[in-house]
Amino acid sequence: MTVVPRFNRILLKLSGEVLMGSGQFGIDPDTCDRVAREVKGVTDTGLQVCMVVGGGNIFRGLAGAAQGFDRASADYMGMLATVMNALAMQNALEKTGVQTRVQSAIPMASVCEPYIRRRAERHMEKGRVVIFAAGTGLPFFTTDTTAALRAAEMGCDALFKGTSVDGVYDADPKKVADAKRYDTLTFDRVLADNLRVMDASAVALCRDNHIPIVVFNIREEGNLAAVLRGEGVSTIVQ
Ligand code: UDP
């Protein structure tokens, strides 16, 4: 068991792949509902939560560029994909009774709020979940880096990375039967050994701003709350 300290405000990063559930593409409403229940479970305890959602279930800039799209244009398409995921999560959260705001790094006034740091903080103080959409608003970045950046801007105590495995392993646990899970890791070890936690710029940003990264399995019911109570399984990078 990994001991997780008590947090007041966290950022939850979900890759687009989490939202497609068992599908191969797109958004699975049941999965969004399940993730929303996880988030509600922890906001009910008074924890302040903001979220960054990826877009890989719909469009990735690198994949688009490989097909012949101009890289920057493809990245903008990827950022727009994250807005669709953010709206899906907003819908799911509001169905559970959690107040939310979507803030986009690319202003789109008739869809959601623009990203305004101080306003986002105010929303969280009022108990609203803020979902950050459109990444950083800049091509050639990722939503992992966005998550690290927003976590730093929002003064989050930790960045929770929800994945489909229960932490960081020394080999792919889906392929290697005796792969070993790390309870804790240092930022420097993650960077030196190129461990697949988040991309290197995100890890470096968290290291420089002293924001621990908690990698856990979001697909397991009740796991976010369990990890926060120090009862779940995760890997903490600090
Ligand atoms: N993206 C970008 N700038 C950002 C964040 C994202 O250009 O600040 C684009 C990039 O093309 C990326 C896509 O949006 O491939 C979707 O984000 P990401 O691949 O990080 O999503 P995830 O893997 O988390 O689903």
Image: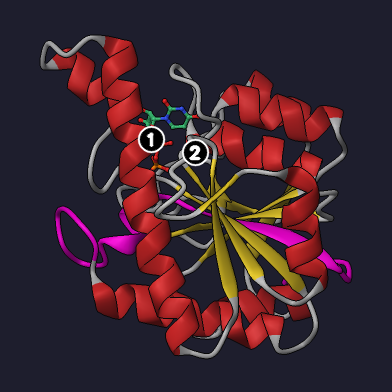
Measured as percent of width and height from the top left, residue 72 is found at 34, 13
For the record, the magenta segment spans: 1-27
Q: Residues within 10 Å of mark 2 (few under 14, many from 20)?
A: some
Sooner in the amino-acid sequence: mark 2 or mark 1: 1
Task: Name the quadrant containing residue 63.
Answer: top left
Q: Position of residue 220 (x, y in %)?
A: 45, 77
Give the residue at x 14% y 55%. 24
Query: Front-most of 6 and 191?
Result: 6
**Does the residue tagged 1 have its C-beta within 8 Å of any atom of ligand 1?**
yes
Q: Which residue: 79% across, 40% down?
A: 152
Q: Is residue 83 left or right of residue 116?
A: left
Q: Label 1, on which residue? A: 79
Instruction: State the image quarter where residue 117 is shown.
Output: top right
Res. 82 in view: yes
Residue 219 can be seen, yes or no? no
Q: Left of 84 or right of it: where is 90? A: right
The main secondary structure of the magenta stretch is loop
Residue type at tag 2: Pro
Q: Is mark 2 within 8 Å of ligand 1?
A: no
Quadrant that contains the C terminus? top right
Identify the secondary structure beneath mark 1: helix
x%, y% of residue 102? 53, 58
The residue at the point 53 percent across, 47 percent down is 169
Coloration mode: secondary structure
